[in-house]
Amino acid sequence: MTNKELFDKGLKIRREVLGSEYVDKSIAGADDFTRPLQELVTEYCWGEIWGRETLDRRTRSIINLSMISALNRPHELKLHVRGALNNGLTKEEIREILLQVAIYCGVPAAIDSFRVAREVFADIEAEG
């Protein structure tokens, strides 16, 4: 696959998981400094890795929620909670993932992750 094909594949997956509005805003907001990062993420993260068929998107969302919570990255977690819901996870399953984070990665990381997840759930309910 060419870089352009991987980028296009990644862009499609990224939009399906995170939502077109968010993705298009991120790409449109890129400048000369940040554009290479947007291209890298879209091509390799979304096209190459998320585009592999061995793990389904639901499983990838479970892994991402765990890792991003452990790394205590609230902005990315907020985005991926929404993506996990788009990929078929339930609020209850997300809660269980965050409880697992508490045990293996620490209570402070889980507390922050629960707070972020609740914000996403509230935002979605308000949009509804």
Image (cartoon, grey):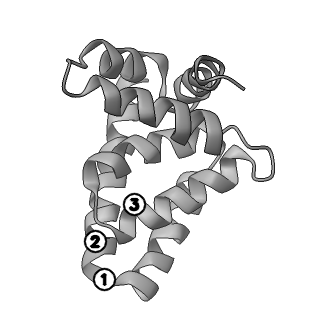
Residue receiving disc 2: 111
- Give the vertical position of 59 relative to 99 (above or below): above
Q: Quadrant of the C terminus?
A: top left
Expressed as whole percent of the image width and height from the top left, the position of residue 13 reads 61, 28
Q: Amino acid at mark 3?
A: Ile
Expressed as whole percent of the image width and height from the top left, the position of residue 34 reads 24, 28
User: In front here: 19 or 1?
Assistant: 1
**Image point (28%, 65%), residue name:** 72
Image-quadrant location for residue 57 = top right
Residue receiving disc 1: 107
Mark 3 or mark 2, whichever is nearer to me: 3
Q: Is residue 83 left or right of residue 56?
A: left
Residue receiving disc 3: 68
Is the C-beta separation of discs 1 and 2 under 8 Å? yes
Which of the marked residues, 1 or 3, is nearer the chain's N terminus?
3
Query: For the view shown, which residue lies furthest in the right direction?
Result: 54
**Image point (33%, 84%), residue name:** 106
Q: Amino acid at mark 1?
A: Val
**Image point (66%, 43%), residue name:** 88
Real-space CA distance between mark 1 and mark 2, rounded to the nearest whole angstrom: 6 Å
Query: For the view shown, which residue lies furthest in the front direction?
Result: 2
Find numbered disc 1 in the image and state the secondary structure of the residue it sits on.
helix
Residue 26's tag is none
Q: Is residue 117 left or right of residue 42?
A: left
User: In front here: 6 or 59?
Assistant: 6
How many numbered marks, from 0 up?
3
